[in-house]
Amino acid sequence: MVIAKNRGGDSILIEVRFHGRGGQGAVTAADILAVAGFKEGYYTLSFPTFGAEKRGTPVASFLRISDKPIVARDEVYNPDYVVVMDPSLLDVVDVLAGIKKNGMLIANYPKGSEDLKKRFKVEEIEIHAINATKMAMEILGRAITNTAMVGALVGATNIVSIKSVIETIKEWFGDEKIAERNIKLVEEAYRYMREVCKWEK
Amino acid sequence: MRKVVRGFYAIAYAVKLSKPNVICAYPITPQTEIVENLAEMYANGELENCEYITAESEFGAASVVLGASATGARTFTATSSQGLLLMTEVLYNAAGMRLPIVLAIANRAVSAPLSIWNDHQDSISVRDAGIIQIYVENNQEAHDMIPFAFKVAENKNVLLPFMVCVDGFKLTHAYEAVDLLNQEDVDNFLPPYNPVVSLRIDKPVAMGCYAPPPTYMEFRVALEYAMERAKKVIEDESKEWYEITGRDWGAHIKAEYCEDAEVAVIAMGSIVGMIRDVVEEMRKEGMKVGLLKIRTYRPFPAEEIRKALTNVNKVIVIERSLSIGSEPPVTLDVKSALFGHSSQEIHSVVLGLGGRDVPRTQIIKIIKEVYEGKVKPGKRYEGLKEFEEVIP
């Protein structure tokens, strides 16, 4: 793993919070990264929280990646990274709550990074937008944005390698065609975010 | 083989390795995917000599495993919350009939109000049934405790149902690395079930039948004796488990840093890991704090707790359930264990009911307040919002 930032003293601990709506795969996004991180020799933990088990309601899922066994099972209150799957959540959920200084927000947001930055007006938080819904519609034919957002997060942070993510997705989806399309989507979102980060730096 | 898996799978896979003959369940969140995984294994032909039965309710599921267990089958079921309450009538029978059924309880709050989230009210509510209860802190322990449960439950000195209590969502829905057992190790540890008596056409017996006043009491007291004997069996099997797997979970309790602790925290379930982490951090800062993890809530390890707390002055009992109208359940047992032996300050802290998250900061606050003598002993609620009751 190429850890972008190490904020946790003598050991690495990266905490990520995903916001989505039931059915968009926020839980799966965290799970895929937990498996991918494990493949690289790290301890990982992912788990969800939802209001009710219904499609469309706001859900959150959490991911911890560390070089030491993970014992904390409380929700992630001070994330390094926040990933937002659905632009409509920005109106109803305080997605930046507790985010660490120099943390990063990556949102599925069609109006672009500049617009998103204006919306939040926060300093010391890196903010990136990606039109994941459009990418998912083009590649999957469905507005399920989780794999795109996984690609975007990895592109922006190198939290795990894209290779491990692709390997994980191959194993994850039983149907080969679905796996292939999701890999294509992950790669596209990954490439896009790498470019964006390059420009913005 | 170390693998990142969901809690459900870790449990289901361990059930498979334990070679059950009958699995029967009714779905309920957050348990459902345990039996879904088993149903899939069954459909794929991975469960030999096993019947997977879908019941119409938890009452039905418990009844099916009771009947199957009485015929000498190794049986498994899983449930949560209202499902466990609906099973309760049958489970008292299963214990009284001395049937070693193993249950995985994905711990969830009970209604009303409706909550799918985690606390310990469901399994605590059946504490008096004559069922062994073990609470686990992570999915490795959940995985390990399944074959362990069969081994202890089926021991002829025990013959009691065994509940492996796993925090719903916090563990069942969590992906984490688990060292999955292999069939050979489980086979070496867990021999096939060899019942003392079973329902057979060629040798008919009656089970769970009518006991009038001259005999009833002895059956019930015999249950108590069996639970007492289970203590030794759990100790022995824990040692064997350690020898086979190298994982030392302790037997009834796991006491850490208690020898010279001013304050010790008692807790059960998935919250234990975080408390241990906080305790270790406080130790580095020079605070004399300890952790006492209760694994077996039934049989209750009174003697072990007494011993572990010998030098401790203040005890914090973390409670994830209530006994409405009295003190919280674990506190009652801890107080009774200490009564007449020592006089520690007991702080009974109720938190995290119905899945309310317990942040690390809350645990730090609770311990510090007690350590610095800022709070009086007794029962209190942590993370409770101020609210006004409407009394019409």
Image (cartoon, coloured by chain):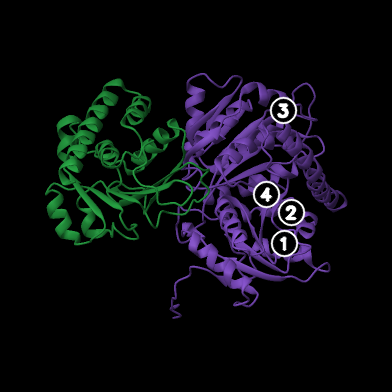
Chain colours: A green, B purple
Instruction: Please give the name of the residue rendered at 67% of the width and 49% of the height, measured from the top-left corner.
Output: B295
Residue B333's mark?
1
Q: Mark on residue B295?
A: 4
Q: Secondary structure at mark 3?
A: helix
Is residue B37 or residue B179 the one in the foreground? B179
In this picture, is A180 found above or below A103?
above
Q: Quadrant of the C terminus of chain B?
A: bottom left
Neighbourhood count class around disc 3 (C-alpha, 10 Å): few under 14, some 14–19, many 20 upward: some
Local crowd at mark 1 within 10 Å, few (<14), some, or many (≥20)? some
> Which residue is under mark 2?
B300
Three-letter amino acid code of the residue under disc 3: Phe
What residue did someone put label 3 on? B189
Q: Chain letter for mark 4, please.
A: B
**Vertical arrangement, residue B366 with respect to residue A1, above or below:** below
Q: Position of residue B31 (x, y in %)?
A: 50, 42
Which badge, 3 or 4, is on the more N-terminal residue?
3
Secondary structure under the numbered disc 4 in the rendered image? loop
Could you tell me how far apart the alpha carbons at marks 2 and 4 are, in whole angstroms?
Answer: 9 Å
Please tell me if label 3 and label 4 are on a single chain. yes
Looking at the image, is mark 2 or mark 1 earlier in the sequence?
Answer: 2
Q: Secondary structure at mark 1?
A: helix
